[in-house]
Image: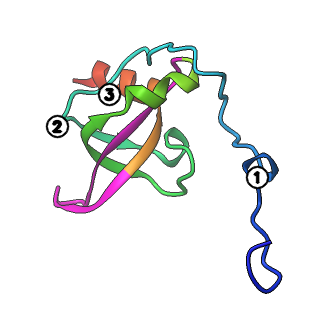
Amino acid sequence: MLESGKFLLSASRLPSATVDRVPNSGTPPRKVPAAGQVLDLSSSEVKYRQAPLRLSVERVRLDISGWYAGGWVWLEGYELDADGHAISWQQALVDVAAIERDAERS
């Protein structure tokens, strides 16, 4: 118990994520974007997001992407507005198929 009736929940009591997550197998994502690459992603291609995302990739987090069996990649970068201006820093769990699709269009 913390203070005046407030309880601290252990991690084991928190709800599990809905992403297909396996013990970190070290399986790298099938495809990763290059730093500076701009991705136009639909809401279905980004976990935990309800709106499309235009992301200028700054960093690929391979250290935690191994938890998603090669199908998802954790990215960090700037969300861009319609004019290409950075509006906020974002972290996004992105479906690798979206990156593969973007590479085919280029």
Q: Residue at x 78, y 78 (%)?
A: 6
Residue that label 1 marks = 14
Q: Residue at x 50, y 22 (%)?
A: 66
Question: Where 2 falls versus 26 (above or below)?
Answer: below
Instruction: Tell me the kind of residue under disc 1.
Output: Leu
Q: Classify residue 38 as left or right of residue 49.
A: left
Q: Earlier in the sequence, mark 2 or mark 1?
A: 1
Residue that label 2 marks = 36
Q: Classify residue 16 as left or right of residue 32.
A: right
Instruction: Tell me the kind of residue under disc 2.
Output: Gly
Residue that label 3 marks = 102
Q: Earlier in the sequence, mark 3 or mark 1?
A: 1
For marks 2 and 1, give the CA distance: 35 Å
Q: Classify residue 8 as left or right of residue 66.
A: right
- Residue numbers of the magenta segment: 70-90
Q: Decide: marks 3, 1 in contact (CB < 8 A)?
A: no
Residue 41 lies, in percent from the top left, at: 40, 42
Q: Residue at x 76, y 52 (%)?
A: 14
Q: Residues within 10 Å of mark 3 (few under 14, many from 20)?
A: some
Q: Is residue 83 magenta?
A: yes
